[in-house]
Image (cartoon, rainbow, N blue to C red):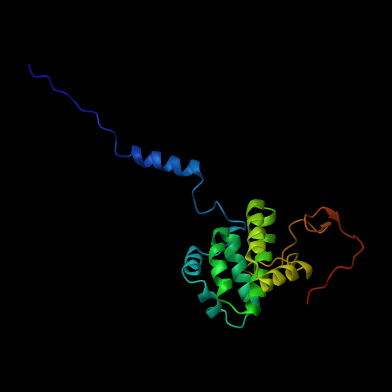
Amino acid sequence: MSCEVTRRTKPRWQPIILTGFALIASGVGPTRAQCVGFSDRASQTELDAFVKAPSSLLERLRNDKEKLRSRLSSYIATNPSVLPSVQTLISESASPDRSTIGAALRLAEALCTSTKPDAARKIRDFTQRVGDLAVQAGYSAAGEDGSSAQLQPRDNKPTQPRGGALLEGEWKTKLANPFKPVPLPN
């Protein structure tokens, strides 16, 4: 009479499921840091290329400040963890480009304010820590000229300001003038 000992082994799929649950519980995934809608996000390949070589953005968009502002704000709003690469971009750029980078930071902050306030705060803190006067001047000028109020996604269709047209001010807590003339499109 032989006594056969059966050895129980774990199913092969069990570690895969446990890993999946751990990733879901930890919030790891491609959508965790994005401030903008799916159609306005930068692709992951664009983000990876920017992180690897930030100055390549300056080379590709040479002499087109508007595209630089739009593309960089899209990168930052899609994933605010690219800010260290923005620091590298600032150090490798000329002064006029630095003011455009500051405007892009302000636009990205405006895009993140309503959906991800922590990301907006991170962008604002980053801009203050940079210490570059041209970047800070571009950041301030973008807030003064109202460019953050006319947010333009990648399809270049102007959208309504995120706080609504009835509120204004930095934190959208001050009532706007209801009799103020409406700006006409160009």
Quarter holding the C terminus is bottom right
Identity of the residue drawn at 46% across and 68% down: 52
> Residue lying furthest top in this view?
1
Quarter holding the N terminus is top left
The answer to whether residue 150 is left or right of residue 25 is right
> Residue lying furthest left in this view?
1
Q: Could you say which quadrant of the image residue 154 lies in?
A: bottom right
The answer to whether residue 21 is left or right of residue 59 is left
The answer to whether residue 129 is left or right of residue 169 is left
Q: Could you say which quadrant of the image residue 39 lies in?
A: bottom right
Q: Percent x, y for residue 56? A: 50, 76
Identity of the residue drawn at 90% across and 60% down: 177
Q: Percent x, y for residue 123? A: 64, 59
Residue 156 in view:
no
Identity of the residue drawn at 64% across and 78% down: 95
Vertical relation: 110 (above or below) 66: above
> Residue lying furthest front in this view?
131
Identity of the residue drawn at 63% across and 55% down: 119
Vertical relation: 133 (above or below) 116: below
Q: Percent x, y for residue 100? A: 66, 74
Residue 97 in view:
yes
Q: Percent x, y for residue 19? A: 40, 42
Labels in figure, total: 0
> Residue lying furthest right in this view?
179
Vertical relation: 138 (above or below) 161: below
Q: Could you say which quadrant of the image residue 64 lies in?
A: bottom right
